[in-house]
């Protein structure tokens, strides 16, 4: 059995990756270390919790006593665990530094003690490049993160690289664009807008709605990670972009259309502070290795809207019964 440690595997991308990994690799045993913050949910793993090839460990990556032995026992580490929401990092950045930077440090230190470790995948983000007015970011571009989340991720991204350059830890760094798909916490634009629309609530569009994000289906992300785990080169950075650059206002109209609602639900609200105007990833390096996104955005978005429509059991308890979620929504958007 190949021993794979996934951190943050109860979150959006992590849970999709755990499911993908168990389905794709019969010889993998996945240990899943997750703190179960507001974003980490056992429900995301409902269909794999009892799989004998999946062991769930409720713990913090910052706790070396818990995380260290798991890293030391692994053949591969795929490190997703992080605080991930830009708006929350604007409200309170401390936990981003703690988890994203210090947590990565704890795992990397343990990786130094594991001579049989074959791969340490540091999951970074396209946000580390900062706003890209024109053209597309390539892996060697300067990093210009512009919000506390992005800066924390950039710190972890370069720290991981340094453990390859200095200590020969078999690190690869991946920088993906905006993911979408099932099990995404309803604070991010797509699940927030779909679930609001289903209840005829307004959808709060920041600024002029002209900001551009590049959308990547979460399963295309998982397939790219799988390829990189097997054929990536240590010390290298890989962009993973969906090639679907869409203005937020256009995305919003399409979501409302798929949800069977009208544009009257759109509520223009004050812009996000320091709001990056555009992200764009050049993906020639990954495409040269044989990866192509397989999910066309129109189809993937339609299916994603349908998933939230069919899975109210998953999101209603968060939106209707979680006081911490309600407090966040009120702090971010004001009282309805
Ligand atoms: P998410 O917020 O849905 O999930 C994060 C997970 O990490 C949760 O399960 C949470 O409980 C866990 N976690 C947080 N702090 C932890 C700690 N101290 N110890 C252990 N577990 C902890 O995030 P996501 O959107 O799935 O993102 C996963 C990774 O991918 C992150 O590193 C993020 O920066 C990166 N990323 C995300 C996107 C995107 O569009 N969502 C794009 C590019 C990169
Ligand atoms: O680009 C990759 C990043 O994508 C990941 O690293 C982050 O973890 C992930 O959260 C995501 O960051 P964004 O800030 O791009 O995602 P979010 O869904 O928060 O916002 C997407 C766009 O939609 C952004 O331009 C802000 C806008 N927006 C968002 C919300 C929540 C709105 O207009 N209204 C909203 O209510």
Image (cartoon, helix red, strand yellow):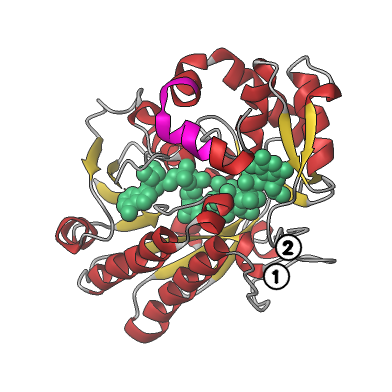
Please say if 27 is above or below 225: above
The magenta stretch spans which residues? 320-329
Q: Is residue 193 visible?
A: yes
Q: Which mark sits nearer the N-terminus, 1 or 2?
A: 1
Q: Nearer the viewer, residue 58 or 163?
A: 58
Q: Which mark is residue 138?
A: 1
Q: Can residue 327 be found in the magenta stretch?
A: yes
Give the spatial CA distance, label 1 vs label 2. 5 Å
Q: Which mark is residue 260?
A: none
Is the C-beta separation of discs 1 and 2 under 8 Å?
yes
Q: In percent of the image, x 57 and y 64: which residue is there?
A: 150
Counting from the top left corner in percent of width and height, residue 319 is at 50, 25
- The outermost residue toward the bottom is 166
Please say if 135 is above or below 316: below
Q: In percent of the image, x 42 and y 54: which residue is there?
A: 82
Q: Can residue 200 be found in the magenta stretch?
A: no
Neighbor class of circle 1 (other Cα within 10 Å; few <14, some 14-19, many 20+) is some
Q: Which mark is residue 282?
A: 2
Counting from the top left corner in percent of width and height, residue 199 is at 65, 15
């Amino acid at each position: 059995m190949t021993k794979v440690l996934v951190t943050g595997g109860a979150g959006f991308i992590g849970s999709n990756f755990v499911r993908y990994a168990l389905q794709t690799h019969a010889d993998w045993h996945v240990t899943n270390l997750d703190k179960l913050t507001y974003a980490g949910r056992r429900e995301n793993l409902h269909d794999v919790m009892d799989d004998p090839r999946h062991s769930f460990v409720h713990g913090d990556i910052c706790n070396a006593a818990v995380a260290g032995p798991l890293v030391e026992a692994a053949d591969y580490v795929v490190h997703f665990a992080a605080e991930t929401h830009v708006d929350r990092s604007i409200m309170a950045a401390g936990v981003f530094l703690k988890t994203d930077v210090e947590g990565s440090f704890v795992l990397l230190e343990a990786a130094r003690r594991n001579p049989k470790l074959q791969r340490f995948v540091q999951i970074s983000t396209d946000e580390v490049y900062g706003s890209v007015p024109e053209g597309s970011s390539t892996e060697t571009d300067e990093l210009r993160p512009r919000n506390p989340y992005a800066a924390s991720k950039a710190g972890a991204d370069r720290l991981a690289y340094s453990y390859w350059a200095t200590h020969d830890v078999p690190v690869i760094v991946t920088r993906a664009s905006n993911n979408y798909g099932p099990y995404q916490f309803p604070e991010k634009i797509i699940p927030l807008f779909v679930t609001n629309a289903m209840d005829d609530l307004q959808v709060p569009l920041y600024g002029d709605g002209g900001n551009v994000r590049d959308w990547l289906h979460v399963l295309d992300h998982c397939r790219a990670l799988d390829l990189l785990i097997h054929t990536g080169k240590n010390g290298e950075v890989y962009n993973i972009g969906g090639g679907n650059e869409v203005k937020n206002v256009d995305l919003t109209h399409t979501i409302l259309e798929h949800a069977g609602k009208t544009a009257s639900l759109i509520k223009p609200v004050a812009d996000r502070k320091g709001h990056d105007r555009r992200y764009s990833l050049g993906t020639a390096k990954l495409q040269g290795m044989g990866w192509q996104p397989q999910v066309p955005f129109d189809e993937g978005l339609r299916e994603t809207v349908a998933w939230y429509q069919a899975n109210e059991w998953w999101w209603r308890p968060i939106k209707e019964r979680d006081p911490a979620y309600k407090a966040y929504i009120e702090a971010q958007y004001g009282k309805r």
